[in-house]
Amino acid sequence: MAEAKLGNPAVVGLGGFGMTTLILQFHNLGWCGIGPVIWLGLCFGGTAQLIAGLLEFRTGNNFGFCAFSGYGAFWIALCFYVIFGTNAELVKAYPVLKLTGHDLGFFLLGWTFFTFILFIASLKHHSCLVWIFLTLLLGFIGLDIKELAGNKMIGTLAAYDLIVCALLAWYLMAHVIYAEVNINLPVGQPWIKD
């Protein structure tokens, strides 16, 4: 009896990551409000990506399991951080929720270190994945500098860098989807080979 063909959870993970990252940068550049970021972050970038990560566990792909589950949790945490930390009534009732000083910078710094670990592992994968993680790492470093040092120009550069990251994630998503119908998009060679 033939085993049933399963879908590749990476397409949802990459789609959610790319969409939410893109819209957040539109917000960071002042092109849209925070509302679309919150809803996409909770639903597509957060919940759907988290589920994709959990499904990667079943495929035995530890990289995808860690990345999609981790960044799915990142989006959910960021959305709750913004929702509860900026809600005047909640902050009044629970002052510990108030966003202060460099809180967001330290939150992002933790994700910078997480991304660095995945970037190193990506070097053994194809070039497209390396570029996604390199631009993501540089974007997080830029956002760290913006939040911790107050450098808005670096924050603007980070936003444009992260737009590239989001589009690369969609390119990789398209690569996986198109391969099923014999349209082969190149993804390049690993930067570090065995």
Image (spheres, rainbow, N blue to C red):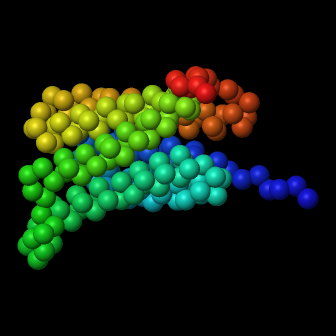
Q: Quadrant of the C terminus?
A: top right
Please name whichever residue, 193 or 26, is drawn nearer the observer in this view of the structure: 193
Q: Quadrant of residue 109?
A: top left
Up/down of 42 relative to 89, above or below: above
Measured as percent of width and height from the top left, residue 164 is found at 39, 29
Please name whichever residue, 61 or 27, is drawn nearer the observer in this view of the structure: 61
Residue at the far bottom in the pictured view: 93
Q: Residue at x 13, y 74 (%)?
A: 94
Q: Is residue 103 left or right of residue 116?
A: left
Measured as percent of width and height from the top left, residue 153 is found at 15, 28
Measured as percent of width and height from the top left, residue 25 is found at 29, 38
Up/down of 56 relative to 150, above or below: below
Q: Residue at x 57, y 46 (%)?
A: 10
Up/down of 84 relative to 169, above or below: below
Q: Is residue 102 left or right of residue 137?
A: left
Q: Is residue 48 visible?
A: no
Q: Quadrant of the N terminus?
A: bottom right
Q: Is residue 167 left or right of residue 89?
A: right
Measured as percent of width and height from the top left, residue 159 is found at 27, 33
Q: Is residue 141 left or right of residue 137?
A: left
Q: Residue at x 15, y 42 (%)?
A: 147
Please name whichever residue, 79 or 100, is drawn nearer the observer in this view of the structure: 100
Q: Residue at x 49, y 51 (%)?
A: 66
Please name whichever residue, 180 or 77, is drawn nearer the observer in this view of the structure: 77
